[in-house]
Image (cartoon, rainbow, N blue to C red):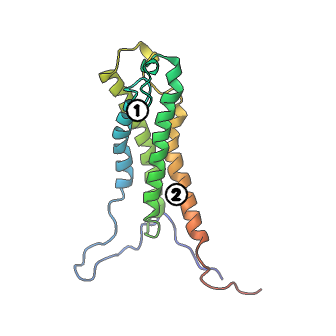
Amino acid sequence: MTKPTSNLLDSGPTRDTDPDTGTDTRDRKWWMWLAVPAASGIGLGLAWWLLAPGGLNVISGNPALADPTASAGRLPRDLVLAGLLLLSGCFTAVLLDSKVRQPGHGIRTFLAVLGGAAGALVAWQVGMLAAQWWGPAANGSEGFTLRAATALLLWPGATALVTFLLTLFSLMGKQPEAPPLAP
């Protein structure tokens, strides 16, 4: 016989109450896994504009790359945003791994991946908005923009992959609960 496993999307038993106060002890802040990554896209968008060529160009300081219409700055500009999104996805996955033993891990992971996708879109749009407000005027699509839109998938992709790997490694390190029965 095998031991039944619980559904990952279940948020726990129907009644988790503190015996002293009678209040619900389950974590009711599940929406934070969606809202915090989406809101942190604002800071990432501003950081992208500050660091990337065509923005304030803080990383290189090269005046040749300061022009947002220069073709030499397109790849580094996309790579700066890709690096920021990849770092954010790994950070989100590490935060998720710290709560892996609590019920509702599946729904938290799903919401964090969804929040990462929303945060990546917010970061892209905030970076372009910052370039319009504080950057030099540009013609149409030749200004500060993202050329490789697939970079926006790095945050949710990194969150999902690193969460999967951390969960897999933690499960591989566990000892079996009971020896298998001989046939």
In terms of secondary structure, where does tag 2 sit? helix
Q: In the rendered view of the protein, which quadrant contains the C terminus?
A: bottom right
Q: Position of residue 138 (x, y in %)?
A: 39, 14
Tell me the residue at 50%/65% (across/down). 8
Res 166 → quadrant: bottom right
Q: Is 123 situated above or below 2?
A: above
Residue 152 point in image, percent of width and height: 49, 37
Residue found at the far top of this picture: 139
- The answer to the question of whether label 2 and label 1 lie on touching residues, with beta carbons closer than 8 A, is no
Q: Say how many tags the image has.
A: 2
| Residue wearing tag 1 | 51
Residue at 42%, 23% (x, y): give it.
54
Separation (CA) of disc 2 from disc 1 = 28 Å
Residue at point 50%, 37% (across, down): 82
* Residue positioned most to the left: 21
> Which is more N-terminal, label 1 or label 2?
1
Look at 55% across and 68% down and name the residue there: 170
Three-letter code for the amino acid on which mark 1 is drawn: Leu
Amino acid type at image mark 2: Thr
Q: Is residue 7 above or below residue 83?
A: below
Give coordinates of residue 174: x percent, y percent: 58, 75
Q: Disc 2 or disc 1, which is closer to the eye?
A: 1
Q: Is residue 37 above or below residue 150?
A: below
Quadrant where the N terminus is found in the figure: bottom right
Residue designated by label 2 = 163
Vertical position of residue 30 compared to residue 119: above or below: below
Dot 1 lies on which element?
Answer: helix
Residue 146 coordinates in the image, percent (x, y): 48, 27
Side of 60 relative to 36 (left or right): right
- Decide: few, some or many residues near mark 2? Use Cα within 10 Å; few <14, some 14-19, many ≥20: many
Asked whether, in this view, residue 47 is left or right of residue 168, the answer is left
Label 1: few (<14), some or many (≥20) within 10 Å?
A: some
